[in-house]
Image (cartoon, coloured by chain):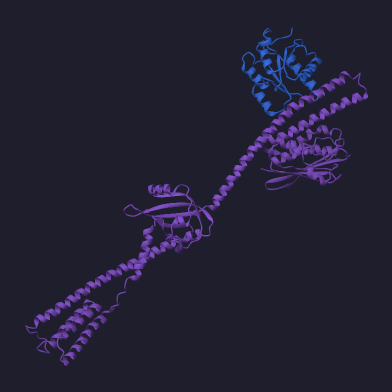
Chain colours: A purple, B blue
C-alpha cells in the first residue's frame, strides 16, 4: 500500500490530460480513398485552373496544384501525395507549360518546374513530421489511458476495504480518503479532501505531535492510539499506523494513515480494568475479614474453651466433694451447670468446624459416595443405639470433591435423618441417586421423620437456625449450615422438601468432575 | 520400674488449669513430682538452671507438658528452643492446649513435638487425658538418659 500523494495527484493529472488531448482529424482510412483523394484533388485543381485560364486569369494554376498536393499529403499521407505530385506535374506540364498539350519541358521552364517539385517535397516533409508527432501523441495518450485505468482500479481496491485509509501531504492536507474513512468518520471524500486532518478529526495525540513527527521522519513509520471526533460529534479511539512516503530525492512528500476503530475494545478494556480494581479492593477487604474471622475462630478455640473447662471442672469437683452438704436442688443445679457447659462445648466445636470449612483448602479427588455413606453411617452409630431403622441405600455414583468435607456433610444429613425419625417406631431412611447428568448428579436423603413446615424452608440452612425445640430434638443448629457451606464450596446446591409429620427429603447436587 | 516416677515440668499460665491438672494428677498419685512454671521464660529458666532455678539439680525433667498460649515467650518458641538445643532436645514434650487449630498442630509437629493433646472441656475426659498422659510419660515411658528419676 505504498501509494502517496504524488500518485493521487498524478492520477488526477492523467484524467485531465486524457480529456484534453485534441482528437486528430480522422484523415483518410483506406489506401483507395487516399489515392482517390489524390486524383480527385488534382483533377479539381486542374479544372479550376483551366476555368480561370479560360477567363484569362494567369498564374493561379501553380498554387492550385500545390494546394491539391498539400491537401492530399495532409489527409492521405505520402503515397497518395506522391501520386498527386506526379499527376500535378504531368497536368501542369501538359496544360500550362509551353508548348501546350505536350509533356515537353523547355529549358527556360525548368527552374519553374524544379521550384514546384521542391515546394511539393517541402510540403510532404512537413506533413510527414506532423504525422509522426501525431502518432507519438496518440501513443502517449493510449499509455496514459491505460495508466489511468490501472490506477483507478487500484484506488477502487482501496475502497473495497473497510479499513480506514487516507493520505495527507506534508502540510497536513488530505489528498486521499477511502470508503472505510467515510464509513468511520462520516465525511465523504469530496468533503474531506483538502481539509487539514487534525483539524477535521480533532485528533487527540498520546504524545506531542512534534515527537510523533520526529519518530515518523526517523523511522518512516509510527503506530499509536489516537482519539478522533467523527462528523456526528462522537469520539472514536483508533489504532493508527502512519507511513511516510518519500520521493526519489528522499524528501518526504506524503503520509499514509491507516486506522482501525478500537473504541469497543478500549471500552471493554477499561471496564475490565475497573472491575479488576474493584475486585482487587474487594479481595483485600475479604482477606482482612478472613483474617479477622481466623483470629476470632482462634480465640474462640482457645480462650472460650478454657473458662468453660474450668466451669465444668469445678462443678464436677463440687458435685464430687460437696455431695454431702448439697440438698437435692443443689445437686440438680450442679448437674445443670455441667450439662450447659457440655452443650456450650459442643456448640463451640461445631461452630469451629463450620468456620474451618470456609478457611480450609479443599483437597479434591474422586470419592465413592457408597463408601462415604457407609462410613458416615458408622460415625453416627452411637445415635442409633437401641433404634430400629430400615436403611434403603441405592447405587450411588462417584463424585469429585474433598473427601473429608463431603463425609462431614453426609454425617450431618444422616445424623439429622436418624434424629428426626427418633419418634417413629418404623424409621425408614433412603439414600439414592435421583439424577445422573453429563456433569453432575443429584443425591437425596429421605426420611419418614417428623419433617418441617415448608414455610420455614428459607431458615433451614442458616447458622443457629432450629425448627424444633431443644427438648424435642437436640442440636446446635449448625449441621445444615455446615452441609450447605460444604456443598457450595463444591459448586453444588442443597435443598429440601418436607411437610409437617410427613418426613423430609434433602437433595444434594454435586459435580462429577 | 513401676515405682520410679519422673519429674513432670508443666508450663501453664492459667492457675485454674494448673489447679485442675494437679487435681487430676493427684487422683492417681502423680501430683508430687510436678514442677509448675507460669510462662515460657520461666520454663526456659528452669531448663537452663538459671534465674531462681540456679541451684537446682541439673537433670532434665522426664516430660514437659507445654501450653501454647503463654505470656512473654509462647509455647511454640519454647518448643523451638528446646528442640534446637543439643542438651534439651531429647526431653519428651507434650503440647497440652485448648487449641484445636490445625496450624498450631502442624507447627508443633514440625518443631518435633512428641505428642499433641487438646484439653477436653468435659471434666471426666480431662481427668482421663491428664491421668493417661501422666502414667504414660512419667511411668511407662523410659525417659532419655540424664532425666531425673525418683528413687
- Judged left or right of residue A421, residue A33 is left
- Judged left or right of residue A50, residue A170 is right
**Coordinates of residue B139 in the picture (x, y in percent):** 75, 14
Whether residue B126 is visible: yes
Residue B148's place in the image compared with A484, above or below, is above
Q: Residue A429 occupies which quadrant of the picture? A: top right
Residue B27's place in the image compared with A498, above or below, is above
Of residues B144 and A85, which is closer to you in this image?
A85
- Judged left or right of residue B126, residue A400 is left
How many marks overall? 0
**Coordinates of residue B142 in the picture (x, y in percent):** 71, 13
Q: Quadrant of the N terminus of chain B?
A: top right
Residue A468's place in the image compared with A296, above or below, is below
Q: Tell me which residue sits at (76%, 33%) in the image.
A: A350
Residue closest to the far left:
A107
Q: Tell me which residue sits at (18%, 90%) in the image.
A: A52
- Judged left or right of residue A49, residue A365 is right
Of residues A335 and A190, which is closer to you in this image?
A190
Whether residue B59 is visible: no
Residue closest to the far front:
A199
Residue closest to the far right:
A328
Residue A277's place in the image compared with A88, above or below, is above
Q: Tell me which residue sits at (15%, 84%) in the image.
A: A90
**Coordinates of residue B85 in the picture (x, y in percent):** 62, 16
**Coordinates of residue A402 in the picture (x, y in percent):** 69, 37
Q: Quadrant of the C terminus of chain B?
A: top right
Amino acid at each position: 500500500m505504498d501509494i502517496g500523494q504524488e500518485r493521487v495527484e498524478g492520477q488526477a493529472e492523467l484524467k485531465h490530460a486524457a480529456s484534453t488531448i485534441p482528437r486528430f482529424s480522422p484523415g483518410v482510412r483506406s489506401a483507395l480513398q487516399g489515392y482517390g483523394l489524390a486524383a480527385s484533388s488534382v483533377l479539381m485543381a486542374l479544372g479550376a485552373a483551366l476555368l480561370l485560364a479560360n477567363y484569362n486569369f494567369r498564374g493561379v494554376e501553380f498554387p492550385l496544384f500545390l494546394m491539391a498536393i498539400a491537401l492530399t499529403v495532409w489527409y492521405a499521407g505520402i503515397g497518395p501525395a506522391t501520386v498527386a505530385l506526379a499527376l500535378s506535374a504531368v497536368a501542369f506540364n501538359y496544360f500550362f507549360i509551353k508548348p501546350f498539350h505536350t509533356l515537353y519541358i523547355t529549358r527556360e521552364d525548368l527552374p519553374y518546374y524544379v521550384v514546384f517539385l521542391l515546394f511539393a517535397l517541402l510540403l510532404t516533409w512537413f506533413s510527414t513530421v506532423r504525422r509522426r508527432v501525431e502518432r507519438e501523441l496518440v501513443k502517449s495518450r493510449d499509455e496514459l489511458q491505460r495508466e489511468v485505468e490501472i490506477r483507478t482500479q487500484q484506488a477502487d481496491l482501496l475502497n473495497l476495504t473497510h479499513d480506514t485509509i487516507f493520505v495527507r501531504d506534508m502540510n497536513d492536507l488530505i489528498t486521499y480518503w477511502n470508503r472505510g474513512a467515510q464509513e468511520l468518520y462520516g465525511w465523504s471524500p469530496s468533503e474531506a479532501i483538502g481539509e487539514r486532518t487534525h483539524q477535521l478529526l480533532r485528533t487527540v495525540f498520546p504524545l506531542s505531535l512534534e515527537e510523533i513527527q520526529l519518530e515518523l521522519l526517523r523511522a518512516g513509520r509510527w503506530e499509536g492510539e489516537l482519539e478522533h471526533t467523527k462528523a456526528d460529534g462522537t469520539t472514536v479511539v483508533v489504532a493508527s499506523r502512519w507511513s511516510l512516503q518519500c520521493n526519489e530525492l528522499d524528501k518526504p512528500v506524503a503520509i499514509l494513515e491507516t486506522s482501525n476503530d478500537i473504541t469497543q475494545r478500549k471500552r471493554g478494556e477499561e471496564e475490565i480494568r475497573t472491575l479488576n480494581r474493584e475486585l482487587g479492593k474487594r479481595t483485600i477487604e475479604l482477606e482482612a475479614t478472613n483474617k479477622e474471622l481466623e483470629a476470632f475462630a482462634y480465640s474462640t478455640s482457645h480462650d472460650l474453651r478454657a473458662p468453660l473447662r474450668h466451669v465444668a471442672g469445678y462443678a464436677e469437683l463440687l458435685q464430687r466433694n460437696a455431695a454431702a452438704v448439697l440438698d437435692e436442688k443443689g445437686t440438680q443445679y450442679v448437674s445443670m451447670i455441667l450439662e450447659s457447659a457440655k452443650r456450650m462445648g459442643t456448640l463451640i466445636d461445631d461452630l469451629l468446624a463450620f468456620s474451618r470449612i470456609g478457611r480450609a483448602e479443599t483437597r479434591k479427588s474422586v470419592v465413592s459416595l457408597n463408601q462415604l455413606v457407609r462410613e458416615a453411617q458408622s460415625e453416627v452409630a452411637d445415635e442409633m443405639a437401641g433404634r430400629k431403622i430400615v436403611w434403603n441405600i441405592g447405587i450411588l455414583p462417584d463424585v469429585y470433591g474433598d473427601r473429608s468435607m463431603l463425609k462431614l456433610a453426609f454425617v450431618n444429613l444422616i445424623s439429622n435423618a436418624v434424629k428426626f425419625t427418633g419418634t417413629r417406631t418404623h424409621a425408614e431412611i433412603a439414600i439414592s441417586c435421583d439424577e445422573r447428568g453429563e456433569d453432575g448428579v443429584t443425591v437425596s436423603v429421605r426420611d419418614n421423620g417428623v419433617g418441617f413446615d415448608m414455610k420455614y424452608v428459607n431458615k433451614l440452612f442458616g447458622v443457629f437456625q432450629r425448627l424444633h425445640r431443644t427438648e424435642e430434638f437436640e442440636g446446635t443448629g449448625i449441621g445444615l449450615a455446615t452441609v450447605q457451606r460444604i456443598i457450595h464450596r463444591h459448586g453444588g446446591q442443597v435443598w429440601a422438601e418436607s411437610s409437617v409429620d410427613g418426613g423430609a427429603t434433602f437433595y444434594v447436587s454435586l459435580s462429577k468432575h | 520400674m513401676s515405682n520410679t516416677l519422673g519429674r513432670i515440668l508443666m508450663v501453664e499460665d492459667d492457675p485454674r488449669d494448673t489447679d485442675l491438672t494437679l487435681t487430676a494428677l493427684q487422683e492417681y498419685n502423680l501430683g508430687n513430682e510436678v514442677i509448675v512454671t507460669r510462662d515460657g521464660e520461666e520454663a526456659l529458666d528452669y531448663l537452663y538452671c538459671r534465674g531462681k532455678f540456679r541451684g537446682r539439680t541439673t537433670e532434665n525433667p522426664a516430660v514437659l507438658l507445654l501450653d501454647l498460649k503463654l505470656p512473654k515467650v509462647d509455647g511454640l518458641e519454647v518448643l523451638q528452643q528446646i528442640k534446637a538445643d543439643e542438651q534439651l532436645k531429647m526431653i519428651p514434650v507434650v503440647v497440652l492446649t485448648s487449641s484445636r487449630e490445625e496450624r498450631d498442630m502442624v507447627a508443633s509437629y514440625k518443631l518435633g513435638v512428641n505428642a499433641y493433646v487438646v484439653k477436653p472441656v468435659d471434666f471426666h475426659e480431662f481427668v482421663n487425658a491428664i491421668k493417661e498422659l501422666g502414667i504414660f510419660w512419667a511411668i511407662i515411658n523410659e525417659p532419655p538418659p540424664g532425666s531425673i528419676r525418683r528413687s
